[in-house]
Image (tube, rainbow, N blue to C red):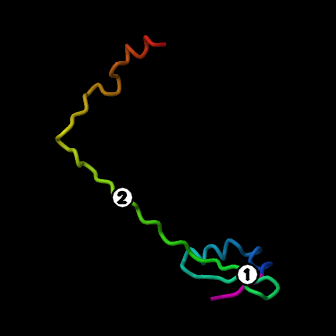
Amino acid sequence: MPIVNMHEAKTHFSKIVDQASKGECTIIAKAGKPVAKMVPLDEPTPKTMRRFNFMKGQIEVPADFDTMFQKEIEELF
């Protein structure tokens, strides 16, 4: 795990972040003493899986769905 000083970390921040995204950890030191660690984030796992077509054949969308009640809505304004 490489150790870089604060000035180098500020100068090469993008490079350090790119390395972290590839799985590499980096220690950042101030006056030679480690103060922080740049580590990659874990991939978030989806809480629930979405099920597609789970109601297929059970519901029907009318052909005029996008214009349903258009006249009534226009009369409201």
- Residue 56 in percent (x, y) is at 20, 44
| Residue 61 point in image, percent of width and height | 25, 32
Place residue 67 in its image quadrant: top left
Give the percent coordinates (x, y) of residue 72: 38, 14
Disc number at residue 77? none
Residue at position x 82%, y 85% in the image: 31
Q: Badge 1 is on which residue?
A: 35
Report the residue at 41% width, 17% height from top. 73
- Magenta span contains residue 41: no
Query: Could you say whether the residue bearing mark 2 is in a helix, strand or loop?
Result: loop
Magenta stretch: helix, strand or loop mostly: strand
Q: Residue at x 45, y 13 (%)?
A: 76
Residue carrying label 2: 48
> Label 2 is placed on what type of residue?
Thr
Q: Residue furthest left?
A: 57
* Residue closer to the observer: 9 or 50: 50
Report the residue that reaches farthest toward the top.
75
| Mark 1 Cα-neighbour bin, 10 Å: few <14, some 14–19, many ≥20 | few
Quarter assignment of residue 11: bottom right
Q: What amino acid is at disc 1?
A: Val
Residue at point 72%, 81% (across, down): 28
What's the magenta region?
1-5
Q: Secondary structure at mark 1?
A: strand
Give the x, y percent position of residue 23. Answer: 54, 79
> In the visual, does 60 lie left or right of 49?
left
Q: Mark 2 or mark 1, which has the lower sequence index? A: 1
**Horizontally, is 13 left or right of 25 in the view?**
right
* Quadrant of the image containing the N terminus: bottom right
